[in-house]
Image (cartoon, rainbow, N blue to C red):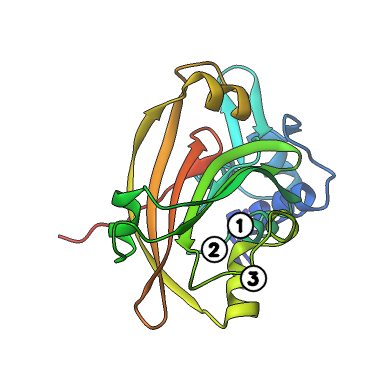
Amino acid sequence: MPNHHQNGMPAYRKIQASILKRIENGHLKPGDAVESERELAKIHRVSLMTARHALTVLEREGMVQRRRGAGTFVAPPKIHFNKLMGFTELMAGRNLSACSRVLSFSIVDNEHPVAARLGLADNTALSKLTRLRLGAEQPFALETCYWSAQEFSGFTRASLARGSLFSILERDYGIQLAYADEEADAAAAEATTANLLQVPRGHPLLRIRQVIYSTQGKATLYVLGLYRSDRYNLLVRRFR
């Protein structure tokens, strides 16, 4: 009889762990084929149903893609952002190298709706940073961040290109970021955005607008992000 629990761990979890380990150490790369349900069942000495369940869960988590008649393959890198983390942290959680290309950095005083979201007067000077975020040298997102230029002065384009904005705020300004209020909707990629994200014009993007608060409950950052919908997954728990 196949063993559905091994060393206290459900057998399907053991199968998942073995596949994830090979993805993380680079033995399985995006696009590579994963063993079939039948092969996994034989290797791990479990039922076909257990092997199928392992692949179903990995597919639901965005780790593999199952193509009818072709098999199961390692999915392109996909990020789950259900916790407030900077891009660098998110990518590190998936063992992917992260880097950013600073597209522009300036001081603006005419973005009144953004100032209002940060609880500031209309004509407050804001630092505005637009970056292309890359993971494993692939474009993931186009993000524009705003913060009070007076309260957090001393940023330079070079320092922002080198380090994580979250880390700089925490290390240099003593600001601990705690939570974000977010609005998520769909947007179609305009020509410039499509070119930067390497998608066709009109491609569906996930647009998220965030007001990020400190542990003191103060609105600190406003972020407008355009994310490649094929590389991000947003899970929501709803209560009745």
The three-letter amino acid code for the residue at tag 2 is Met
Q: Are marks 2 and 1 in contact (CB under 8 Å)?
A: yes
Quadrant of the image occupied by residue 214 = bottom left
Residue beneath disc 1:
90
| Above or below 13: residue 178 | below
Q: Which residue is mark 2?
A: 85
Separation of residues labelled 1 and 3 (CA atoms):
16 Å
211 on left or right of 203:
left
- Furthest residue in direction left, as rendered: 240
State the image coordinates of residue 35 (x, y, percent, origin top left).
72, 35
Point out residue 88 in the picture as x, y percentages from the top left corner: 66, 58
Q: Which mark is residue 168?
A: 3
Does label 1 or label 3 sit earlier along the sequence? 1
1 and 3 marks in contact (CB < 8 Å): no
Q: Is residue 137 left or right of residue 75?
A: right
Q: Residues within 10 Å of mark 3 (few under 14, many from 20)?
A: some
Give neighbour class at mark 2: few <14, some 14-19, many 20+ (Cα, 10 Å): some
* Viewer-side residue, 64 vs 96: 96
* Depth check, front residue: 137 or 121: 121
Q: CA distance from mark 3 to mark 2?
A: 13 Å
Instruction: List x then y, in percent, for residue 90.
Output: 61, 57
Q: Residue at x 75, y 47 (%)?
A: 23
> Circle 3 sits in a helix, a strand or a loop, which is it?
helix
